[in-house]
């Protein structure tokens, strides 16, 4: 269950990031790498957060 939630969140974040990049004219050929970078940063930040 946790993994499916995690994958759903990643997928939704990917959609949000790509939408924002397109809105602000980010080059399409660089969007995939930028999206991966943002997801890596979000994962690094979230390691300190706990669901109690």
Image (cartoon, rainbow, N blue to C red):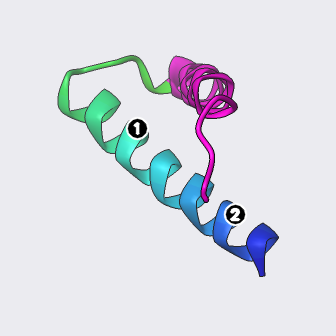
The image shows residue 3 at horizontal and vertical percentages of: 80, 68
Residue beneath the point at 58% across and 24% down: 45
Provide the secondary structure element on which disc 1 rests. helix
Q: Which residues are magenta?
A: 29-52
**In the image, is residue 27 above or below residue 1?**
above
Give the position of the C terminus as an image quadrant: bottom right
Q: Nearer the viewer, residue 7 or 1?
A: 1
Name the quadrant of the N terminus: bottom right
The vertical placement of 18 against 28, above or below, is below
Label annotation for residue 7:
2
Does residue 13 appear left or right of residue 11 in this picture?
left
- In the rendered structure, the answer to whether residue 26 lies left or right of residue 52 reads left
Disc 2 secondary structure class: helix
Residue at 19% across, 33% down = 23
Quarter of image, res 18: top left
Q: How many marks?
A: 2
Q: Residue furthest front?
A: 52
Question: In the displayed structure, does residue 26 sit left or right of residue 7?
Answer: left
């Amino acid at each position: 269950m946790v993994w499916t939630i995690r994958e759903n969140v990643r997928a939704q974040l990917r959609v949000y990031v790509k939408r924002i990049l397109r809105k602000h004219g980010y080059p399409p050929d660089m969007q995939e790498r930028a999206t991966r970078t943002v997801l890596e940063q979000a994962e690094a930040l979230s390691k300190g957060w706990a669901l109690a």
